[in-house]
Amino acid sequence: PLGGGSSSSRTDGAVERGSNHATALGSLGARGIRSPYASVAAQGFLGCTVLNPATKAGYSPVAPLQSFDRQVARPPPEEVNAGVLALPLIDNSSRVSDDLVGEEHSESPLSTGGVHRLHREVDASRWCVTLEDLTFFEEQVRELCEDEKIPDNEEFPNDFHHNPRYGPTIYQVNEHYIKPVTSKAGGMSWALMRHPEGLECDVFATHCWAEGVFEFLSKVRDAWPNDFHARNLYCCFLANPQSSGIDVILQEDPAKSPFAKALSSAKHFLVIPNNKVSIYKRLWCVFEAHLAVEAAKDRDLKITLPSSVPKLTMLRVAV
């Protein structure tokens, strides 16, 4: 899905056809974005500076899309480190309630037109979470995994579903944790459930829902900017309301979408690849890359590529 939705109606890593999301993105053609590869490849990220998190040096990648398609080496299960980054938990005393798993999702009485009022009152650029929130989120998901309450998708099986380094896909985490929890809370997003007033967007993560949730969290931490002021993150599956109103929100002009609004406020843009599929098979990621390239030219947006991008595909920017 593009920004949210059930895994049962998707083509893995591809654009949903016939959906409201695809309809909303139809206007991208008029903006010169004709395919998942053509526009970004044409931009090539040239003319802007990006940061390699391993060296913090500036690079201008020649062929970023091809490099993202290279799969990350898959370690044998016995070599996987199941350790969790030791960050302070916001609340480590409460376990995930049993009655949240498998609960029916109903529209909140606080919603207007199927969209929770908070998503009308709080600007989309503020639908963010902190690193501490991510740690709490990981603790909750790992607990459900240990209790076998996040099943694999039989139609689209994940070879790394039970691997503690990768974990279930974000599709499955959305269905079996995010939707039930936020539905019970009233129908807002997970981010606004944690911070009803919102948080200023410092960091924007572009990614594909096909990755394991623990893989995503680990790579976000690894790529986190060395910037004291970078405290809050926008990532779509936590920012957007998954249990109600997502179709309404994403029917709007993509240039006015939550993605565009958050990216317009972000100071850092993190590219988060995965070991399964190129993130640029997800059309929203193409659009986000386009916006990031333009923002890097027009203002001081810093683009951070993953450290796994082969250096042979990079050219160092002359200082």
Image: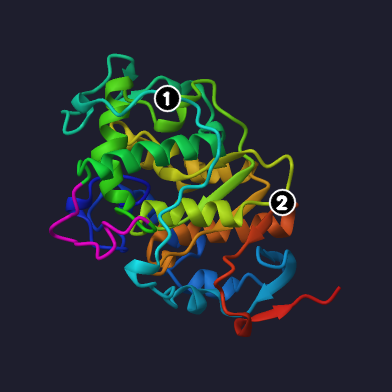
> What colour scheme does the image use?
rainbow
- Which residue corresponds to the image point at 43% horizontal and 28% vertical from the top-left? 92
In the picture provided, is 77 more to the left or to the right than 150?
A: right
**Residue 293 occupies which quadrant of the picture?**
bottom right
Q: Main secondary structure of the magenta part?
A: loop
The part of the chain drawn in magenta is: 151-164
Disc 1 crowd rating (10 Å Cα; few below 14, some 14-19, many 20+) is many
- Between residues 317 and 170, which one lies in front from this camera angle? 170
Whether residue 161 appears in magenta in the rendering, the answer is yes
Q: Please, what is the three-letter code of the amino acid marked with disc 2?
A: Asn
Q: Residue furthest front?
A: 78
In this rendering, the label closer to the viewer, 2 or 1: 2
- Which residue corresponds to the image point at 50% horizontal and 34% vertical from the top-left? 133
In the picture provided, is 301 more to the left or to the right than 154?
A: right
Residue 239 vs 220, above or below: the answer is above
Q: Please, what is the three-letter code of the amino acid marked with disc 1?
A: Met
**Percent of width and height locating residue 115:** 34, 26
Whether residue 174 appears in magenta in the rendering, the answer is no
Q: Secondary structure at mark 2?
A: loop
Q: Which mark is residue 226?
A: 2
Q: Quickly name the residue at label 1.
A: 193
Lower position in the chain sequence, tag 2 or tag 1:
1
**Residue 313 occupies which quadrant of the picture?**
bottom right
In the picture provided, is 158 more to the left or to the right than 30?
A: left
**Percent of width and height locating residue 53:** 65, 63
